[in-house]
Image (cartoon, rainbow, N blue to C red):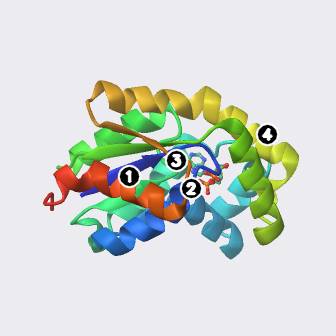
Amino acid sequence: MRLVLLGAPGSGKGTQATRLREHLQVPHISTGELLRAAVAAGTPLGLQAKAIMSAGNLVSDEIVLGMLEERFQRSDTVHGFILDGYPRNLSQANALDVLLDRIGQSMDLAIQLEVDQELLVARLAGRAQAEGRADDSPEAVRNRLRVYEEQTAPVVDHYRTQGKLAHLDGVGSLDDVFTRILEAISPYADVG
Ligand code: ADP
């Protein structure tokens, strides 16, 4: 099945996507991870993205779409995928619909993990200590949350309008949240 995970930075998308990948046996595609790999490898794209990412701003739609198109060409995506970190604004949401349409596919479901702002800030502060990600500095975190509210939150309505939104409570233990996700996807379990 083809799933997209929506939620603010710190909402737990990445962690839940990893579990879902095991469960569904489809690849987890994280645009943040693809970008961080490009930065680490020092590719021209990575060099361009580095400063933008560490400030917590969005990399250009064009760059990210190109990266995603390339990723979809790999054969492991034929039975579906879990998309995490994309789409992050309405123009990316429209571009994704067009891209999938062109390869004869469409999204099955968008899962939104809702977590309130205070808890997000606390989770990200904890992660900053544990992982030392460049964009987990207090200033970059504030900016990422602002960018999410302004640009990414409207993407939720895009999927709601299409009748493809599952809005879930993202607060609780990892197991609790995963159970909610499994319930939300159960009607699609047989989608190949
Ligand atoms: P988080 O959800 O915690 O912000 P991600 O790993 O999804 O972390 O993204 C990290 C950074 O990578 C973003 O702040 C942004 O700079 C860049 N990025 C990831 N996905 C996209 C995207 N779809 N469009 C533009 N920039 C992106």
Which circle marks residue 170 in the picture?
3
Q: If you read the primary sequence from the N terminus, does the residue marked by circle 2 or circle 4 appear first?
A: 2
Q: If you read the primary sequence from the N terminus, does the residue marked by circle 3 or circle 1 appear first?
A: 3
Q: Residue at x 15, y 62 (%)?
A: 192
Give whichever of 49, 145 is nearer the camera. 145
Which circle marks residue 180 in the picture?
1
The 10 Å Cα crowd at callout 1, few under 14, some 14 to 19, many 20 or more, is some
Location of mark 2 (residue): 12
Local SS, label 2: loop
Local SS, label 4: helix
The percent coordinates of residue 181 (x first, y second) are 37, 54
Location of mark 4 (residue): 142
Q: Residue at x 44, y 32 (%)?
A: 156
Q: CA distance from mark 1 to mark 4?
A: 28 Å
Left or right of residue 18, residue 115 in this image: right
Q: If you read the primary sequence from the N terminus, does the residue marked by circle 3 or circle 4 appear first?
A: 4
The reply to whether callout 3 and callout 4 are in contact (CB within 8 Å) is no
Left or right of residue 91, residue 108 in this image: left
CB at disc 4 and ligand 1 closer than 8 Å = no
Q: CA distance from mark 3 to mark 1?
A: 9 Å
The amino acid marked with disc number 4 is: Arg
